[in-house]
Image: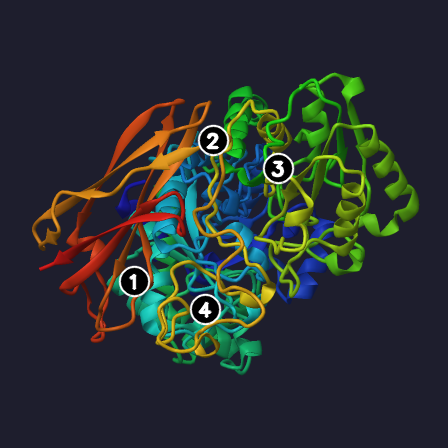
Amino acid sequence: MEKLELQKIFENLTLKEKIYQLVQLSGEFFKSDTLAVGPQQKLGISQEVVDNVGSVFNIFGAEQLIRIQKEYLEKSRHKIPLLFMADIINGYKTTYPIPLALGCTWNPDLIKKGMQNTAEEAAVSGIHVTFSPMVDLVRDARWGRVMESTGEDTYLNCEFAKAFVEGYQGDLDPNKNIASCVKHFAAYGAPEGGREYNTVDMSERRLREDYLPAYKAAVDSGCELVMTSFNTVDGIPASGNKWLMRNVLREEWGFNGIIISDYAAIQELIAHGVAEDDRDAAKLGIEAGVDIDMKTPVYSNQLEGLVNDGVISEKLIDEAVWRILNLKNKLGLFENPYRGADVSKEKSVILSPEKLKLAREISRESIVLLENNGVLPISKDKKIAIIGPHGESKVLSGSWAINSNPDDVTSLVEAVKEKISEENLMYAKGCEMTEDNSILGGFGRAIEEEKIEVDKEKDLEEALKAASKSEVVVMALGEHYLQSGEGGSRTEISLEQAQVNLIEKVKELGKPIVLVLFNGRPLVLTNVVDKVDAIIEAWFPGTEGGRAVSDVLFGDYNPSGRLTMSFPRRVGQVPLHYNEFNTGRPVKTSIHNSRFTSRYIDVENTPLYPFGYGLSYTKFAYGDIKISSDKLTNNSTITASIKVKNVGDIAGYETVQLYIQDIKGSVVRPVKELKGFKKVKLESGEEQNIEFVINEEMLRFYTSSMEFKSEEGRFKLYIGSNSDELQEAEFELI
């Protein structure tokens, strides 16, 4: 539609009609008349609001979306179509590993392809917008939503933010692409105590340097929407934070798309204590620049009165409405309100062989080999016992894969059966996933496991019997899928004691043990690492996750995943990240007695497994760093090169990582920062010369005067296989 036509529609809207465009309701209001009565009463809205809202979230399936759009437009005076949005986090029907696992691929190009596939599945189902990517920086494994982030590093998160947005949106082809909503703006990943929805309190320097860049990367990549976070930023909740939304996002970054609140976040300004009532909350939200109020009656019931009473200008409403109409027009909804939705194409596009093939590839690349004393890979002629509740589990996509169907998932046991003879495979559950399923309640779904009668002794007996007949034991353990994700904050992030007991009992049999972990966060593994012979971190690996793990177990794929979040030795170490600031009393170089250095007295400072870490079935040897010059200027570059050789017997991928340390700054600088990486395949005996180009821009930071620039002086340059195992060189910025 031409802008002039759109302008005519806009000018003919009444104030009420404008306000309704700023309201988003959930799908339950549109599924049937009888179902809608309860939600309406609970929310405190009228049928008039339901009939005129601008957008709906979490309705799935082309047939249903076409019906709802048709019924809506029949009632609409101006024929302005609905926007359909959805939580599509790690896949639509074909699911991929959780985002934390996707980060472990260190392969943004591959993830971009996965999100292209996701967008196509969503588009043919009639979805217009996905609430993804979540680019919140995460450093506290207690927080459940670390599973939705790509990790603890700013540089890497930026790379994946771009990959997600570009994969989803493409050129916004109605048959292949959907709009992307980046979230949660801002700093949602840093709640105090790792507790969901809790306060975030940090300096503006840390916010700008570490937490904001990934959101900006998404904005610079063209994301059409930004979602506000639940937390405070400098004492002001994000959904009412004018500085954050208008000054930073709109003015500094030039974002002219839609800002949408997270679920009920505007009404929650009251509970935060910055709004007195719904009217006050509506005022704060619209003045801050939040265009769409998700799932509350605040905008629909309060904005008209605020305008009529002269408390706020109608101009604020107009600006928000125009942005919403503009996106609907950009997506082509005025020409085709049923954009993309195609019942027949759903059958051929969703879960197609090509999409499942890519899902398997991505799942394999996300798997991280943490330990291996030579038991892996397993020979296919060996007798294998798979023990643990995740062995037959088909819920492998994590807590936010809300549109996935477990029936589409291949379990680990099913996948192994595809590779070895039936007589060589035994399975026993061994124990329950959790000892107290009551903690899992909520999230809109029943926990059926609560009703199951458990015979612990029988489960253990069957497990030991199966293990005793085997040559290798594969233990499929980890978290219940609801132990991580939103609302899944934990103070203890070790394996459940029942699982640890099971490992100990199996170990007594003297069989080699491979521990396969299915989980949504880094776990404390200190108490089990010496009880097993190998550890595979599979995460929640998605639809093809069982087959991907099986590929790794038997050596059909050489694991190449590298951690993007540090694994602590004890939960008391968190928040934990590799790029920490030094102190005046560092453990290794302080002049003080070890007692009086920055350390714990009961455990090392270092993580059990550091950022960037991961093993392979082959070995890689690094040479010395060579740099083209030890002097760098604002207008020149330095090339740093290193030879990497596969000294093992099979081909494998190595992720070569570049880190830089600013030795002296006007403010304290991290001990090292990731500035580049290259994932390369090396055949057995093959050697490659890996090069990185360093320029002045890579050295910029927020100085003592809050200017984003570099400072002259010496720098250390590190290249290696992870944040701990590195070669070192120096250069100077002059």
First in residue order: circle 3 vs circle 2: 3
Q: x, y percentage for residue 517?
A: 64, 43
- Residue type, mark 3 in image: Gln
Q: Amino acid at mark 2?
A: Asn
Q: Which residue is mark 1?
A: 250
Q: Are marks 4 and 2 in contact (CB under 8 Å)?
A: no
Q: Which residue is mark 4?
A: 239
The CA span between labels 4 and 3 is 32 Å
Residue type, label 1: Arg
Q: Taking 194 as reference, is 468 above or below it? A: above
Residue that label 2 marks: 117
Q: Is residue 651 visible?
A: yes
In the image, is residue 662 above or below residue 135?
below
Which one is in front in this view, the residue at disc 1 or the one at disc 3?
1
Residue appearing at x 67%, y 43% in the figure: 532
Q: Earlier in the sequence, mark 4 or mark 3?
A: 3
> In terms of sequence position, does the residue under pointer 2 or pointer 1 come before the other?
2
The residue indicated by pointer 3 is 64
What secondary structure is marked by label 3?
helix
